[in-house]
């Protein structure tokens, strides 16, 4: 070999080392290449059949060494078994850490803690996917639910973060970031948000249309999804069953026109289960499945959750869909696989060793249990506490009665996994008092058992609420009208179990109502008569311990409501009226609520003072820094959830009477004062301008107040917007 040949050979070796090609078969596996070039290479190598398969829920290309991943549910913990039997067929089901329902997690008003919760869920997802003992999960998580709970009768209220678009957007972003991780190149798991768009009624959802104008589309119904994409980094969502302004969401033009072309959503757009078939059957939007699949691909669908292959092959054969369009459809899904690290085996991926090098089941770890307990306690909302009946001082009671159908059960909902254990309210109370206090129990008042127990006790806890599953009933049915779940909206918002509270209260006025529920209720009698009321949601494995932490004062309650609790069902609009301006949510409802949005008490009191602003004139892209002093004026340490509400009196179009635009959960030790700073971004004060097709900051005065709820004004102020954005473009 001559000198020139040796040089050529050496240069070749160095190039191979540089591009790491010794261990690679295809260019798409080379992590040093641009992502889009990697995808170009992969798609160029695929056959038509392989491309068709990559529109499924488990996209894989075995011939090229690409083994995809499946979708799994994960609204409040990984659902890998549970009531809906989410386990993989042929694989052993596994317990998973189970937190309070999503609506309960929202009641924490704590995005940072929500990110930690989602991160643990993602860890378990990786663990169960990659650990050979299980190998049974998947890395695409169908969470969070970014739909808005604009009506408390909606059967899936338990899955959402409440009625407010701003709060929901902050929590959606937090959950997405927890699921996907903070690595710049790889995701821990992929967050696939549900259900785009305006899916907040269940009855006849497959044929109903959610109708509203462009302004509400931008500012309200799509807003949490928008923020989930542009701020959270999600690149996946599922379309809803319903229609939006007469067009099925599965094939609505906004999928491409808005989410792809304006927001930059370049990943997965999935149909809901059975929604593809419904385009022909229930909705009759297309004459046949071949035409329907053509419509789906052209609208932006990249993943089908039901059978689609034969109609797709037929559409290709008839040239209704081109191979180039097919390439565009699969690219989004492959892009998600790339971000998950499934197109390479790079050592730079920090998530590939989860479940490999660490083999202790995450749901068995004390720190996992502690996180659930902390979240559960933080989610508790104290609705009433007359004469400081709570917290219970253990040393001052000898007997406690725990009564009611919800006292000795923890009920998993449809989207729950199977928790490793479950602590009921009764057990949580027993755990706290030990052998020093007698605990009596009665599940009902059969043979006067509840009344007898109440008479014997120093204090009574009555635990009532809904049943999120309605065992042994067919799909679409519930035992009582006030229950709801997927496919069933509530037909009542009163609670028949409140009669038990009346009997117990008559026997012992030292009664605490513990409402364990997925929904608000018109508990008007209890609010008037019962001295103490707490609300906690279903399904947490630490329900009893978290509740006990609050009941006995280890944790001062600071949860806040995320929906308006109406005092009567006739105050609600027709459930199919999606124009919230007609009187829905705290922003437009003129009725006096039973409990307002943002409401919640604590065991202490707070004083707000010394309001300061960093500027009086706010311009585009600036941040208004609102600072004040918050003093704990009571006798116990506690969190306070400070809330910032804005109004726009100079607006030329109808605006909300008040709208949440900032919040922070703040800890203050008793007797201490802390400085609180709320950054209010100008972008969060913008509203959609229909003429200019953009979010604009309107000129004029913005009034605001700060306090502990939507009706609790402690500090007031205003700021002036001097100029308007004249750029005729949409925020991207």
Image (cartoon, rainbow, N blue to C red):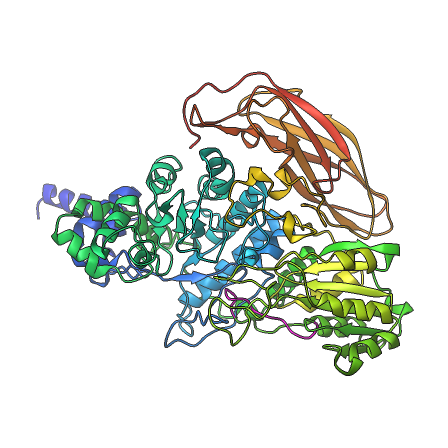
The image quarter in which residue 438 lies: bottom right
Q: Residue at x 46, y 65 (%)?
A: 127
Q: Estimate the x, y position of residue 505 in percent, counting from the top left.
A: 83, 67
Q: Residue at x 81, y 53 (%)?
A: 603
- Pick whichever, 124 or 31, lies toward us: 124
Q: Estimate the x, y position of residue 235 in percent, counting from the top left.
A: 40, 46
- Pick whichever, 539 or 474, lies toward us: 474
> Is 680 situated above or below 295?
above
Q: Residue at x 55, y 48 (%)?
A: 574
> Is 333 situated above or below 436?
above
Asked whether 409 falls inside the magenta stretch, the response is yes
- Pick whichever, 17 or 178, lies toward us: 178
Q: Is residue 643 left or right of residue 552?
A: left
Asked whether 400 falls inside the magenta stretch, the response is no
Main secondary-structure element of the magenta-colored stretch: loop
Magenta-colored span:
407-417
């Amino acid at each position: 070999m001559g000198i020139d040949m040796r040089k050529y050979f050496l240069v070749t070796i160095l190039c191979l080392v540089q591009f790491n090609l010794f261990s690679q078969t295809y260019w798409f596996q080379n992590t040093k290449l641009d992502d889009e070039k990697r995808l170009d290479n992969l798609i160029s190598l695929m056959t038509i059949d392989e491309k068709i398969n990559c529109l499924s829920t488990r996209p894989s290309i075995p011939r090229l060494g690409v083994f995809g991943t499946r979708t799994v549910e994960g609204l409040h913990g990984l659902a890998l078994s549970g009531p809906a039997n989410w386990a993989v067929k042929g694989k052993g089901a596994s317990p998973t850490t189970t937190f309070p329902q999503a609506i309960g997690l929202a009641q924490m008003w704590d995005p940072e803690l929500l990110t930690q919760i989602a991160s643990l869920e993602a860890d378990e997802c990786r663990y169960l996917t990659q650990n050979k003992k299980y190998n049974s999960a998947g890395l695409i998580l169908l969470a969070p639910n970014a739909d808005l709970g604009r009506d408390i009768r909606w059967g899936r209220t338990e899955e959402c973060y409440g009625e407010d678009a701003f709060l929901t957007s902050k929590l959606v972003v937090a959950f997405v970031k927890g699921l996907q991780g903070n690595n710049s190149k790889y995701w821990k798991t992929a967050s696939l948000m549900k259900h785009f768009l305006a899916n907040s009624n269940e009855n006849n959802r497959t044929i109903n249309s959610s109708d509203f104008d462009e302004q509400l589309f931008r500012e309200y119904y799509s807003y949490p999804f928008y923020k989930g994409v542009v701020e959270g980094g999600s690149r996946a969502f599922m379309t809803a069953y319903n229609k939006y302004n007469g067009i099925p969401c599965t094939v609505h033009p906004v999928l491409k026109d808005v989410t792809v072309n304006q927001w930059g959503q370049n990943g997965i757009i999935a149909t809901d289960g059975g929604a593809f078939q419904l385009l022909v059957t229930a909705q009759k939007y297309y004459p046949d499945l071949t035409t329907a699949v053509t419509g789906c691909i052209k609208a932006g669908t990249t993943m089908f959750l039901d059978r689609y292959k034969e109609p797709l092959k037929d559409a290709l054969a008839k040239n209704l869909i081109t191979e180039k369009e097919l390439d565009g459809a699969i690219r989004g899904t492959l892009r998600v696989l790339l971000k998950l690290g499934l197109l390479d085996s790079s050592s730079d991926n920090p998530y590939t060793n989860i479940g490999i090098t660490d083999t202790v089941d995450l749901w068995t770890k004390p720190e996992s249990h502690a996180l659930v307990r902390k979240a559960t306690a933080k989610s508790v909302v104290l609705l009433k506490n007359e004469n400081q009946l709570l917290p219970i001082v253990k040393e001052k009671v000898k007997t406690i009665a725990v009564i009611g159908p919800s006292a000795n059960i923890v009920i998993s909902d449809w989207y729950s996994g199977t928790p490793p254990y479950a602590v009921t309210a009764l057990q949580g109370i027993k755990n706290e008092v030990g052998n020093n206090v007698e605990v009596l129990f009665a599940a009902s008042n059969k043979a006067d058992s509840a009344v007898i127990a109440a008479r014997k006790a120093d204090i009574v806890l009555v635990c009532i609420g809904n049943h999120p599953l309605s065992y042994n009933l067919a799909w679409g049915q519930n035992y009582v009208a006030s229950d709801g779940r997927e496919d069933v909206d509530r037909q009542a918002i009163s609670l028949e179990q409140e009669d038990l509270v009346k009997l117990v209260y008559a026997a012992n006025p030292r009664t605490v109502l513990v409402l364990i529920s997925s929904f608000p209720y018109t508990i008007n009698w209890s609010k008037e008569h019962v001295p103490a009321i707490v609300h906690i949601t279903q399904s947490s494995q630490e329900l009893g311990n978290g509740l006990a932490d609050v009941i006995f004062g280890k944790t001062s309650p600071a949860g806040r409501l995320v929906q308006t609790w109406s005092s009567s069902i006739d105050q609600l609009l027709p459930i199919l009226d999606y124009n919230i301006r007609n009187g829905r949510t705290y922003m437009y409802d003129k009725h006096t609520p039973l409990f307002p949005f943002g409401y919640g008490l604590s065991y202490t009191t707070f004083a707000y003072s010394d309001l300061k602003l960093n500027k009086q004139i706010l311009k585009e892209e600036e941040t208004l820094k609102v600072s004040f002093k918050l003093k704990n004026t009571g006798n116990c340490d506690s969190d306070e959830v400070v809330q910032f509400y804005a109004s726009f009196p100079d607006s030329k179009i109808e605006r909300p009477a008040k709208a949440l635009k900032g919040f922070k959960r703040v800890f203050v030790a008793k007797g201490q004062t802390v400085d609180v700073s709320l950054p209010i971004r100008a972008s969060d004060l913008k509203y959609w301008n229909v003429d200019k097709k953009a979010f604009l900051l309107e000129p004029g005065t913005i009034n605001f107040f700060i306090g502990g709820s939507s009706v609790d004004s402690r500090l007031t102020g205003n700021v002036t917007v001097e100029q308007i954005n004249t750029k005729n473009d949409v925020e991207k």
